[in-house]
Amino acid sequence: MRNSDEREGDAAPMDLTGLRFDLGPEDVPRSWYNILPDLPEEVPPPLDPRTMKPVDPAMLERLFARELVKQEVSQERYIAIPSEVREALVSFARRPTPLFRAKRLEEYLNTPAEIYYKYEGVTPTGSHKLNTALAQAYYNKLDGIKRLVTETGAGQWGSALAAAGAYFGIKVRVFMTRSSYKQKPYRRTLMELYGAEVYPSPSDRTRVGRRFLEEDPEHPGSLGIAISEAIEDVLSDESARYSLGSVLNHVLLHQTVIGLEAKKQFNEAGVYPDILVGSVGGGSNFAGFTYPFIMDRLKGTSDSEFIAVEPKASPSMTRGLYTYDYGDTGGLTPLLKMHTVGHSYKVPPLHAGGLRYHGVAPTLSILVNNGIVKPVAYNQVEVFKAAHIFAETEGIVVAPETAHAVKAVIDQAILARERGRKVVIAFNLSGHGLLDLQGYREYLDGTLKDYEPGELPIFEQAK
Ligand SMILES: *Cc1c(COP(=O)(O)O)cnc(C)c1O
């Protein structure tokens, strides 16, 4: 007998199967994908800031959990995900995340291209960052660490680590750039709800912080300064470790669950993406989504294109140098060989706080140098316009960081229309923007600004 739901349905129901692709909990990957053994070149070693020689792993273990230091230099292609972390990815981070077809956006753009997006906004903190936060909190707990210290800009990373600390029972302290502390009060509320301590940076709790406060008591802060404060704090407490939300190899590794899931979902959809797009702050969002596909390109089994999107105001890949630079403003961290606009570059107060970083991941830098990843840069206003189109057609108000990827996707879809090419475009919708409405308010009021940086890069090169 037919039930009443069926009787109420259309006589000729529409085929809905091509609109979203879901996986079950058992489809959450059992291993992360490590790109290091597949790269065309070796990653140059990090340098100790005191000696400018390759850093001693013991120094790194003072900052990071032991297993994370091992993962940082591992040459294993696949690294097993501990079952406790897999369980957290399912029950707490709500993985696997869905893949959607953006049909209404395609129709709006009148493009022959097919557009798909992986939606990382379903996690409790609203972005992909929880994927590595949970793994990092887990390995620190194994080492008996009592407290994790980190920095945050817009607050996405701080809230992800705070949530992961709540899950695994580790205290979390966050240095939040003062400008965001004031502009994004709800992110601070979220972090405190998860039990984290949040201090505006520069703060009076560290020597570095006090130095910047002396210069300017209302200093707006920067990610680079907040990293310096977090590291100084960690070095003063043996039971504390530092945690970073992007840039490092192990962070990018943990994010590959996104691309590994997406591969299964594209398999289910019966298509393989021709163009993959992601926005770049330090590179973990982009890498997490694309590296499992870049593996195919490096093996020669695909010729997909990869587009990495950054803000024109923080253009490390499009205008930076490929050189050794510090990870922070104070010069306390090891130096990484990367594309950078310089650690002392003052990144303008963009709404895409997660993209306000002076460098990018060393592995991503190598892929850019080898022409495998193509970087593009956009201005703030055009990016919000693209996000506005996406909200009206697809219903999701994306984070300002994600909006950079949306802009590139729309440009590619228009190009496909002009060339009459039926390409498959895919992007990572890294987070929703429901706690970023201040930027959208300015966009609607017409007060949103573009920032054009002058001469770049801005720093003295390390010798
Ligand atoms: C942090 C963030 C990014 C940038 O991530 P990276 O790993 O630093 O490149 C992109 N989108 C959202 C929503 C973010 O929170």
Image (tube, helix red, strand yellow):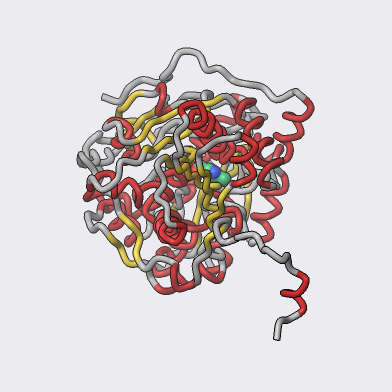
Which residue is pictured at 55% across the width and 47% down the height? 429
Q: Residue at (67%, 49%) from the top-left corner?
A: 187
Which x, y percent locates residue 318? 41, 24
Residue 63 lies left or right of residue 221; in this view the side is left
Q: Position of 420 compared to 61: left or right? A: right
Residue 454 is left or right of residue 301, and the answer is right
Q: Where is residue 363 in the image (x, y as percent from the top left)?
A: 31, 41
Q: Nearer the viewer, residue 163 or 301?
A: 301
Q: Let me know if residue 238 appears in the view.
A: no
Viewer-proximal residue, 327 or 33? 33
User: Is 60 on the left-hand or right-hand side of 104?
Assistant: left
Residue positioned 53% across, 49% down in the render: 117
Please determine whether, in this image, residue 185 is positioned above or below residue 51: below
Residue at 36 percent across and 30 percent down: it is 339
The quarter holding residue 123 reads bottom right
Residue 185 visible from this viewpoint: yes
For the N terminus, give its image quadrant: bottom right
Please provide percent x and percent y for residue 305: 37, 37
User: Residue 191 occupies which quadrant of the picture?
Assistant: bottom right
| Whole-percent x, y for residue 260 in the image | 39, 58
Q: Which of 417 and 121 is in front in this view?
A: 417
**On-image quarter of the C terminus:** top left
Residue at the far bottom in the pictured view? 1
Q: How many marks?
A: 0
Q: In this view, does 339 lie above or below 248?
A: above
Q: Which of 58 and 429 is in front in this view?
A: 429
The image quadrant that residue 257 belongs to is bottom left
Residue furthest front as drawn: 11
